Amino acid sequence: MKKTYVWSLPTRIFHWLLVLFILGAFLVSDEDELLGIHSAFGYGVGVLVIFRIVWGFIGPKYSRFKDFNLNIQEVKEFMTNIFNPPKKYIGHNPAASFVMLSIIIVLFFVVLSGALAYGAEEGRGVFAFLYDASKESEIFEELHEALTTLLFILIGIHLAGVFTDFLLHKEDQTLKSIITGYKNIEGESVKLNFFQKVVAFVFLTLSVITVIYTISSNPISQHEEKPGYEKMLHEEEDDD
């Protein structure tokens, strides 16, 4: 069977950087003194999400949003005939199209809510001007946590879909394609033009630089140096 080059190198690098950044943010999320590192990975994810949105319009075939199959009826048919699908999908199948689009949208709001919480509660980051020690500022953190839970549910559905496809349609090599770029499906291979290469290089490089720069410019302990923290402690002591 002829192999088709489905996922270009930038698409694959985006995927694995996203996995790395999300994992990094998750591993340090429970440590207050590592909040700066958590935010660094979050900003990196933000750059990647912006890139993926841009890539969805200017990227190669199969990565563009117009190639996503968002037909509900086809999703039902796909799920009903999952053991013997009526046709092959070179890019995302109908179910995967909905899940991937949902992940992109939810990721955007996870990053936004996280940045808002970081600014409102810690007085740091791009929304530092929102700093407010009042209880009302915690709404951003609560929203961030709720959206993060939704994100991990979607990621779980995505992984379940990949695992199911691996078991039922191993010959297509869909799982392997996110590493090699190739699927064992007859179709049109993608090819990047110069403009696409430049855009991908700029965004992917910027995402890595953003993480490195943010980590290096933030102290490990946030609570000792955040704006107004000492003042708040003194006010609490006076109240006592």
Image: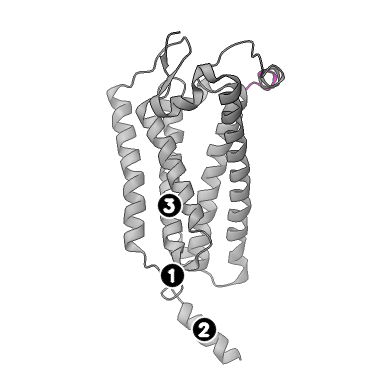
Q: Nearer the viewer, mark 2 or mark 1?
A: 1
Instruction: Please name the residue that numbered disc 3 is placed on.
Output: 41
Residue ID for mark 2: 233
First to last magenta residue range: 69-74
Q: Element under label 1?
A: loop
The image position of residue 152, as x and y in percent, is: 59, 45
Q: How crowded is mark 3: few (under 14 residues within 10 Å), some or many (20 or more)?
A: many
The answer to which of 10 and 46 lies nearer the viewer is 10
Quarter of the view holding residue 94: top right
**Callout 2, which amino acid?**
Leu
Q: Answer yes or no: do the residues labelled 3 and 1 have beta carbons within 8 Å?
A: no
Q: Quadrant of the N terminus?
A: top left
Q: Distance between the residues labelled 2 and 1?
A: 15 Å
Relative to 37, say whether 107 is above or below.
Answer: above
The quadrant holding residue 124 is: bottom left
**Which one is nearer the viewer's eye here, 94 or 156?**
156
Marks 3/1: CA–CA distance:
16 Å
Q: Gap in Å between the C-alphas at discs 2 and 3?
A: 29 Å
Residue 175 on image: x %, y %: 49, 27
Q: Which image quarter holds the C terminus? A: bottom right
Q: For mark 2, does the 10 Å Cα neighbourhood hold few (<14), some (14 to 19), or many (20 or more) residues? A: few
Residue 226 lies, in percent from the top left, at: 43, 72
On whether residue 111 falls in the magenta region, the answer is no
Location of mark 1 (residue): 222
Pair 2/3: label in front: 3
Tell me which residue sits at (62%, 26%) in the image.
95
User: Is residue 30 at all visible to an observer of this figure?
Assistant: yes
Q: Nearer the viewer, residue 23 or 169?
A: 169
